[in-house]
């Protein structure tokens, strides 16, 4: 019994040491040295998810050794991804399409500005696929964020636009986006614009902690509050700050929470069309409205939605939804027969 207690204590202590090892704090200047040595630390969201899947390993299914598989798939090669293989069976074609989407988005293709949409009947595995992607993010190494940023802004967004070409050449990375209004206000007041002194830290993805993973459930049509998507203004701060002061912002919406990671829309077309208009700018311009009169907020996130075929056909039949339809990549998730 004593030996068991020692083992439990050792397991807990080793886990604590490992988590502390992954924690990092420093200035933006120190962070740049890390990126120079390891450019993938600055990966954008779609590239991060693609590496998360492909990095586990991929193999070709041996169709010659499995006659039944050959009858199902024919002569076309089939890839099996280790990231999915222990939980999903008979869905190889569907999984290939998902990985192809993230690969194209990671390469900077148009998919990086489109919604990945799982469409299929109840019980076909759409939600399970979503859960696997979200758990995969939790299993990743922590990413680097601006310390104190409410939406976990990418530190490279601190670099002024006129200097970005030079930094991109020196670091070997692509830089896009802007810091959030609260961080910008802090940069100009607390640090006098000296962005090289801004603090940077690591942040691990967490579903329950709402860090890098945002979830949008179906909303009551009679009470579709966009604060679920973009956050709100904290009225308790209005007695201290003016309405135009960024410090009154409460950037706790799903797009803010899912910045740098993933945003899931559950049963997406159960919502009114007007409620989904935020998707248009979030995909094409990678911007969402800020609450109140604070302009827009940059978001770097993978938007993944799912619903059944009946709702998709109803939504698709309305020609007024063309702007959203043009930004959706459909992946069919049929029953596994």
Image: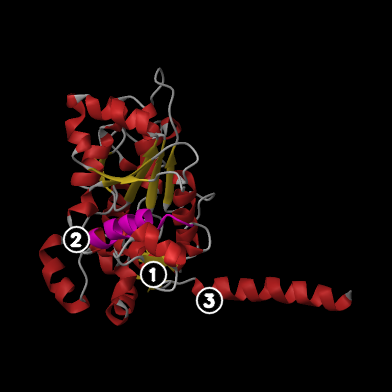
- Spot occupied by residue 209 in the image (x, y as percentages of width and height): 52, 51
Q: CA distance from mark 1 to mark 3?
A: 44 Å
Residue at figure coordinates x 35%, y 68% from the top left: 51
Q: CA distance from mark 2 to mark 1?
A: 33 Å
Q: Is residue 112 magenta?
A: no
Residue 111 to residue 234: above or below: below
Can the viewer see residue 250? no
Dot 1 and dot 3 residues touching (CB under 8 Å):
no
The residue that label 1 is drawn on is: 63
Residue at figure coordinates x 15%, y 66% from the top left: 164
Res 108 label: 2
Q: Nearer the viewer, residue 317 or 212?
A: 317
Residue 254 to residue 168: above or below: above
**Which segment is the magenta one?**
89-104
Residue 194 to residue 306: above or below: below
How many marks the image carries: the answer is 3
The residue that label 3 is drawn on is: 21
Dot 2 and dot 1 residues touching (CB under 8 Å):
no
Q: Quadrant of residue 121?
A: top left
- Spot occupied by residue 46 in the image (x, y as percentages of width and height): 30, 59
């Amino acid at each position: 019994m004593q030996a068991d207690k020692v083992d439990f204590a050792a397991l807990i202590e080793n886990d604590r040491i490992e988590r502390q090892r992954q924690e990092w704090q420093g200035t933006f200047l120190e962070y740049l040295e890390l990126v120079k040595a390891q450019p993938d630390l600055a990966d954008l969201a779609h590239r991060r998810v693609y590496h998360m899947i492909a990095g586990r390993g991929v193999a070709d299914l041996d169709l010659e050794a499995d006659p039944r598989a050959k009858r199902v798939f024919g002569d076309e090669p089939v890839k099996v991804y280790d990231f999915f293989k222990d939980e999903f069976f008979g869905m190889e074609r569907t999984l290939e399409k998902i990985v192809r989407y993230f690969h194209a988005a990671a390469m900077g293709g148009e998919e990086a500005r489109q919604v990945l949409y799982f469409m299929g009947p109840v019980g076909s595995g759409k939600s399970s696929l979503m859960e696997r992607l979200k758990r995969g993010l939790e299993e990743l190494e922590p990413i680097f964020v601006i310390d104190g940023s409410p939406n976990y802004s990418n530190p490279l967004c601190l670099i002024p636009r006129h200097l970005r070409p030079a930094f991109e050449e020196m670091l070997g990375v692509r830089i896009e986006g802007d810091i959030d209004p609260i961080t910008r206000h802090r940069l100009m007041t607390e640090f006098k614009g000296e962005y090289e002194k801004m603090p940077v830290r690591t942040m691990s993805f967490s579903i329950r902690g709402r860090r890098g993973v945002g979830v949008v459930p179906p909303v009551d049509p009679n009470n579709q509050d966009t604060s679920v998507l973009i956050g709100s203004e904290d009225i308790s701060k209005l007695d201290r700050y003016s309405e135009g002061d960024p410090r009154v912002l409460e950037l706790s919406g799903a797009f803010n929470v899912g910045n740098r990671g993933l945003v899931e829309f559950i049963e997406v077309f159960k919502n009114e069309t007007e409620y989904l208009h935020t998707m248009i700018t979030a995909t094409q311009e990678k911007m969402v409205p800020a609450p109140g009169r604070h302009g827009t907020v940059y978001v770097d996130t993978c938007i993944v939605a799912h619903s059944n075929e009946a709702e998709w056909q109803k939504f698709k039949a309305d020609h007024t939804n063309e702007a959203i339809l043009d930004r959706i990549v459909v992946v069919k998730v049929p029953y596994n027969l």
